[in-house]
């Protein structure tokens, strides 16, 4: 979110400094691990769909700026019981926004996409615009594009605190201090530390994803295996197709429910991390149940309702925050960057972000 905000502000002519406590990219936060899903048929709330349409446009613009492919279209499958909230929500989004879709019974889904072998009581909604983003490359592309528009981007520089002094905001880091009239905070799992007002509103959760070498790899190639969100008895799972030597990827939302400190989280994958993901593979995607390539840990920064926080910080003029992306934010970062630049430079945004107001929480 920060690299995108820096890019959008810099290309509008603002004088921009981006501060990152690690490298760009890095493996400490929420955006590493090669790729992230993007879905247009969004069941979580209909307010996301217009933002997604703009996000797709901006990702394609960034590809042209960066001269590389960042967004791959595979189609997406939302699977679950026909009357489950995710399936009802996806169908509502498709109907409301006139999105293309097909409802496929488990047998029809398997015939179309052999990697899917769902139980008969589940259906899949196929929406052809879904796919995945190369997440780390997207961060680098935004940061490099910001630099080309004159932004300064400092890495390995940690923000310690910020304070208001007269009409300026002074940001202190472990290297120096800086004065600004507008401050945008996109600190991911550290948002509650950098913007203390958000500390009671978020918690940080340890998340683990599994990469495997499928037993039948041809069933899981990007042109034959749409990205998926699957709601089953054991919880909700998501996955992406086979990408070169990285393998096929599967994760479980709210993996083991572990609330953690981002500075001391266990980043090693263990047998108990792999077990629920293996069970899901064997039940729903048995042809993918091959050797483990890797287990990778990342972090979710969750709000109570799992919707984002994008807002001006109350009682702090000129300070804007974006956090609590609750494990489903990356796909939006192109448009969130645009929103944050508009808030910081214009005091308002053209986009409807009322869903993300911090004031919805007590």
Image (cartoon, rainbow, N blue to C red):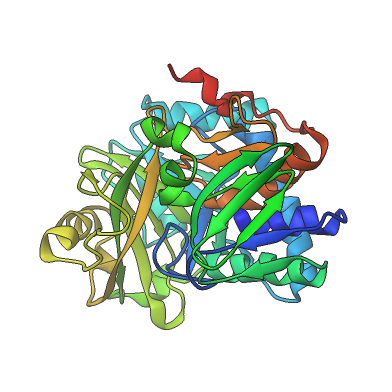
Relative to the observer, which residue lies in front, 24 or 154? Answer: 154
Q: Is residue 239 left or right of residue 338?
A: left
In the image: residue 152, left or right of residue 91: right
Most extreme residue toward the left, as rendered?
A: 271
Direction top: furthest residue: 362
- Camera sees residue 140: yes
**Residue 296 screen position, x and y as percent:** 31, 67
196 on left or right of 152: left
In the rendered structure, the answer to whether residue 65 lies left or right of residue 249 reads right
Q: Position of residue 139 (x, y in %)?
A: 60, 65
Quarter of the image for residue 105 reads top left
Question: Residue 52, position in %: x, y?
Answer: 65, 43
Q: On the rendered image, what quadrant is the C terminus found in?
A: top left
Kindly identify the residue that appears in the image at 78 percent across and 32 percent down.
347
Residue at 15% from the left image edge and 66% from the top image edge: 270
Q: Nearer the viewer, residue 333 or 201?
A: 201
Above-or-below relation of 2 to 157: above
């Amino acid at each position: 979110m920060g690299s995108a905000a820096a890019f959008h502000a810099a290309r509008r002519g603002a004088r921009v400094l981006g501060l990152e406590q690690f490298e760009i990219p890095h493996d400490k936060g929420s955006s590493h691990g090669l790729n992230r899903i993007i879905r247009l048929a969004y069941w979580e709330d209909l307010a996301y769909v217009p933002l997604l349409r703009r996000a797709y446009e901006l990702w394609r613009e960034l590809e042209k700026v960066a001269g590389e492919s960042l967004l791959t279209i595979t189609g997406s499958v939302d699977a679950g019981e026909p009357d489950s909230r995710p399936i009802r929500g996806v169908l509502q989004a498709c109907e409301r926004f006139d999105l293309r879709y097909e409802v496929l019974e488990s047998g029809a889904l398997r015939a179309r996409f052999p990697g899917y072998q769902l139980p008969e009581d589940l259906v899949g909604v196929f929406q052809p615009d879904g796919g995945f983003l190369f997440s780390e490359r997207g961060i680098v592309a935004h940061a490099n594009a910001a630099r080309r528009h004159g932004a300064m981007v400092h890495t390995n520089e940690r923000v310690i605190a910020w304070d208001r002094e007269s009409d300026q905001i002074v940001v202190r880091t472990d290297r120096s201090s800086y004065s600004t009239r507008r401050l945008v905070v996109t600190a991911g799992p550290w948002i509650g530390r950098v913007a203390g007002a958000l500390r009671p509103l978020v918690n940080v959760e340890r998340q683990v994803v599994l990469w495997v070498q499928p037993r039948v790899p041809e069933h899981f190639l990007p042109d034959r295996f749409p990205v998926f969100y699957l709601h089953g008895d054991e919880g909700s799972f998501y996955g992406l197709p086979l990408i070169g030597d990285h393998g096929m990827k599967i994760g479980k939302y709210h993996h083991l429910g572990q609330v953690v400190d981002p500075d001391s989280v266990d980043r090693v994958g263990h047998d108990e991390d792999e077990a629920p993901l293996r069970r899901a593979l064997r039940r729903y995607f048995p042809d993918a149940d091959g050797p483990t390539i890797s287990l990778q840990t990342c972090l979710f920064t969750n709000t109570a309702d799992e919707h984002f926080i994008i807002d001006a910080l109350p009682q702090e003029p000129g300070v804007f925050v974006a956090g609590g992306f609750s494990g489903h934010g990356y796909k939006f970062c192109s448009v969130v960057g645009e929103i944050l630049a508009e808030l910081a430079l214009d005091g308002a945004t053209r986009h409807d972000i009322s869903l993300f107001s911090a004031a919805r929480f007590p």
